[in-house]
Image (cartoon, rainbow, N blue to C red):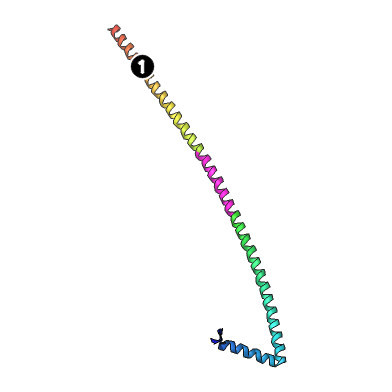
Amino acid sequence: MISFSGTSVALPTTSDLSVLGGLIELLRDPKKSAEAVAQLRAAAGANEKALAALQAERRDWDAAQTQAKQTTAKEIAAEREQIDRERAAWNAERAQAQAQIENWEKQAREALAKAEKDSKAAAALKRDREQRLARLHELAA
């Protein structure tokens, strides 16, 4: 930095001097200037085409990403619906099986109660028969 009456001025770097030297040379030779301008225009055109292609690719990529998200969301929703259907079917089967088990338990309780009643009736008949047989033996004796 060089300071003149309170104003600071930055000194150019070697790179800056090289660029400035190239520009001065172009300004001195009109033919080279025209060629350089043509090359810069061609490069600018190529850059614009590349930018347009990049933007098109980005739009395509964004569209593909959106499509993938939508497809994934649909697949997840379909899988959840399938799981819900399977869960509902399983719950229905389980409820039906539970009802069948409860029915069997009821039938078993009823059969046990009938068996106990029949056992008591059989025991009462046996006692009655034994008592009658005992009386017959008493009468016969």
Residue at figure coordinates x 44%, y 26% from the top left: 110
Quarter of the image with the C terminus is top left
Q: Position of residue 12 (x, y in %)?
A: 57, 87
Q: Position of residue 23 (x, y in %)?
A: 65, 89
Reply yes or no: does residue 87 show up in magenta.
yes
Identity of the residue furthest to the left in this view: 141
In the picture of the structure, the residue carrying the numbered disc 1 is: 124
Residue at figure coordinates x 46%, y 33% from the top left: 102
Residue at figure coordinates x 33%, y 15% from the top left: 127
Q: Quadrant of residue 120?
A: top left
Q: Which of 57 and 38 lies nearest the eye of the viewer?
A: 38
Residue 55, compared with residue 81, is above or below; it is below
Q: Quadrant of residue 138?
A: top left
Residue at figure coordinates x 46%, y 35% from the top left: 101
Describe residue 128's horizontal placement relative to residue 104 as left or right.
left
For disc 1, the neighbor class at 10 Å (few under 14, some 14 to 19, many from 20) is few
- The amino acid at mark 1 is Ala
Secondary structure, magenta segment, majority class: helix
| Count of picture labels | 1
Q: Position of residue 133 (x, y in %)?
A: 32, 12
Read off the magenta span.
75-94
Reply yes or no: does residue 139 show up in magenta.
no
Residue 76, compared with residue 126, is above or below; it is below
